Amino acid sequence: MLREKKVALVTGGSSGIGLAAVKALHEAGVTVYETSRRDIALPGAVHLPGDVTDEAAMARVADAVLQREGQIDILVCCAGFGISGAVEFTQLEAAKRQLDVNFFGVVNAVKAVLPHMRERKSGRIVVVTSVAGAISIPFQTYYSASKAALNAYVAALRNELRPYGVTATAVMPGDIATGFTDAREKSPAGDDTYGGRIARSVSRMEADERGGMSPAVAGAYIRKMALRRSVPPSSSIGVSYKALVMLTRLLPARLVSRVVYMLYAK
């Protein structure tokens, strides 16, 4: 049970993990605002149109919530997308857009709510990253890089905010069965040069994703991280992924790299 009515702002809450988080928070009695580029009505949430890559737009969204509610207790950052392809053949513009949405989109949302949270000396920031940020996936290099950057960002942000009662945590999902898979921007450029390895790698990853856990499981976990008293710098969803991430930290890096190669790059 919540001791008081909390207010949450969720980015990218119109689909996938974000939508699952919106539903889970609403079910817990949280007042939920959702922002995304899709102008759609969501049961259990108030939609505010906004693009996370636009710093001014995120500031307007945060201001709108504060004007209506007077507080933002929780920020959940779910907005993002994925690209795939070989580093050698990926257009720089596509790589920059990947980082602009996945990384700087979070930066814009966090900057929009931080002054309010800091002044209140209260707030929880939940950033959805990925197991791919802890285990870099070949031919999805820029996606992995964006998520690894977020893990580092959250770890540093926690200590900047420690004196102000604001806490941040990174949630690392593994394979989740959502529309994210079909929305991935795939570039086959150079696949002949790389002996078909790009297509094989992405196909393997997409098969794993389609057989992954329900987004509702991720939504419930995000809710737990949003509402519990204390949170770790980062955590994975599900026992198997927690064990996998732990193994990559304990095993020799050369061995981990070899296993990843055999799974996703051979």
Image: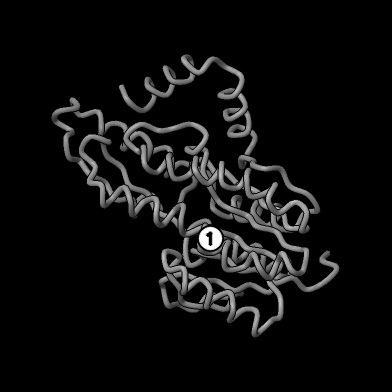
Residue at the farthest left position:
192
Residue at the farthest bottom position:
68
**Which residue lies at the image location 46% right of the left edge and 59% below the top edge?**
105
Lateral position of residue 160 relative to residue 135, left or right: right
Q: Amino acid at mark 1?
A: Gly
Tag 1's secondary structure? helix
Of the 4 image quadrants, the one containing the C terminus is top left
**Which residue lies at the image location 45% right of the left edge and 77% below the top edge?**
40
**Which residue lies at the image location 56% right of the left edge and 41% below the top edge?**
152
**Residue 119: percent from left, percent from top:** 74, 69
Please state which of residues 100 and 37 is positioned toward the viewer in this rendering. Answer: 100
Q: Which residue is mark 1?
A: 18
Does residue 101 lie above or below 255 as drawn?
below
Please state which of residues 167 and 261 is positioned toward the viewer in this rendering. Answer: 167
Please state which of residues 207 and 196 is positioned toward the viewer in this rendering. Answer: 196
**Which residue lies at the image location 64% right of the left edge and 84% below the top edge?**
67
Quarter of image, res 90: top left
**Residue 159: percent from left, percent from top:** 70, 47
Residue at the farthest right position:
3
